[in-house]
Image: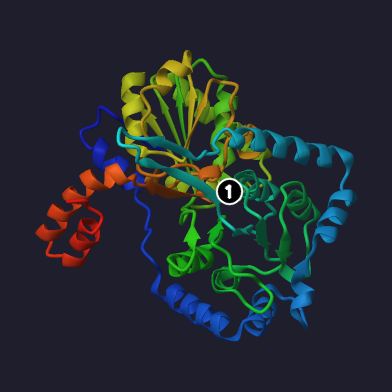
Amino acid sequence: MKKLNTQSPDFQAELKALLAFETAQNPEIDRIVADICADVQKRGDAALIEYTNRFDGTSAQTITDLILTQDDLQAAFERLQSEIQTALKTAAARVESYHQRQKMESWTYEDEDGTLLGQQITPLDRVGIYVPGGKAAYPSSVIMNAMPAHVAGVKEIIMVVPTPKGERNDIVLAAAFVAGVTKVFTVGGAQAVAALAYGTESVPQVDKITGPGNAFVAAAKRRVFGVVGIDMVAGPSEILVIADGTTPADWVAMDLFSQAEHDEIAQAILIGTSQPYLDEVQAAMTRLIETMSRRGIIEASLGNRGAVILAKDLNEACEIANYISPEHLELSVENPQEWAKKIRHAGAIFMGRYTSESLGDYCAGPNHVLPTSRTARFSSPLGTYDFQKRSSLIQVSEQGAQKLGKIASVLAHGESLTAHARAAEFRLKD
């Protein structure tokens, strides 16, 4: 891992270089994705079957071979051991409880002349959730994407998940059953995104697509945005740990590993205020790496983008964290709630030495779909509000029309929009 010191004259340049990640679109990927999306839009199910057989190594003859119903999802759930069933249900219940508190409600008020103003909240009709199914299975992604939609009142939740070589993962399908998914299509990649966005003979067009995927999925989500809504275009996973030296070094080392094992381009950064403690954590990492099943990925991740930063104090550490704007921020310090008040930019803040980031990934309650690549400066975690819409309510009284009509008339004439002005003037008594 790279070693940085805030007292170095080159620190800012070194930090900027550390965080640099090429997010520009790949022209070749964009070209392939554009062709796939156009083909699915034109040929529908036939194109979807063809691409699924080609890219996932399946042998589907009809679209029916790629559809799973509620009965299929329930059967997958019932095949699981009771311990896994309980874990899924408990995690889903905690996520549901948290997201219930995010639910927006409609409101109205009347001003002094009797004009009613307000906001009406309604759920989206139908959403699509993309669940990765390549290198690993992610039942947690199913729960985190589907449960907020379910809480929001979305009537139809359509899930797409690739099944390489036709292998279906029972835990993923069981999670869909627990989280209230309506129907599953065993398709992935850009073709799945296109099918959700444009609709086919069998795949219903959705209003919004959420969930992570590879570079082709990300490019497809960019392309269809505007036809449908999307949650975000996520980059590699990230973790930033601020440690004051009171947390066992092994714990911090494993927390860094927990994100590094996602991908060779994931990022894990540790900020501490004591060089001996930072050395202790690095020694623990050297020792513990021997026990990791994904050792190669972890080593590549830490070597490519990992870092240890020595800060002069926790105040400075928090300012660095605000600049980094991490997806996951662990405050492994004494009095974490006080230090959290200094954090302005982070996807999720994990407070205290007992709060490992992995608990947030699976079962704490808040959503694990978080802004990456410094986008926490202006973005928020996925939530119930992402599956609700706001409509403005305006009911002008006769008295209100006399006052507002004159104002509107003046402004409309100022913009040379005569019809706008006359529409307001017609309702004036004098």
Q: Residue at x 36, y 23 (%)?
A: 342
* Farthest left residue in view: 414
Residue 344 on image: x %, y %: 36, 31
Question: 313 and 111: which one is in front?
Answer: 111
Residue 373 is at least partly visible in this image: no
Q: Residue at x 82, y 37 (%)?
A: 86
Residue 95 on image: x %, y %: 65, 37
Residue 78 is at least partly visible in this image: yes
**Residue 224 vs residue 110: left or right?**
right
Residue 198 on image: x %, y %: 55, 74
Residue 224 on image: x %, y %: 47, 69
Question: 320 and 2: which one is in front?
Answer: 320
Question: 92 and 51: which one is in front?
Answer: 92
Q: With respect to residue 384, does 206 lie above or below? A: below
Q: Residue at x 24, y 31 (%)?
A: 8
Q: Quadrant of residue 422?
A: bottom left
Q: Quadrant of the N terminus?
A: top left
Question: Regarding mark 1 in the picture, which secondary structure is present there?
Answer: loop
Q: Amino acid at mark 1?
A: His
Q: Residues within 10 Å of mark 1 (few under 14, many from 20)?
A: some
Picture mark count: 1
Picture colour scheme: rainbow
**Residue 13 vs residue 57: left or right?**
left
Q: With respect to residue 257, does 407 lie above or below? A: below
Please give the residue where the numbered disc 1 appears in the rendered image: 262
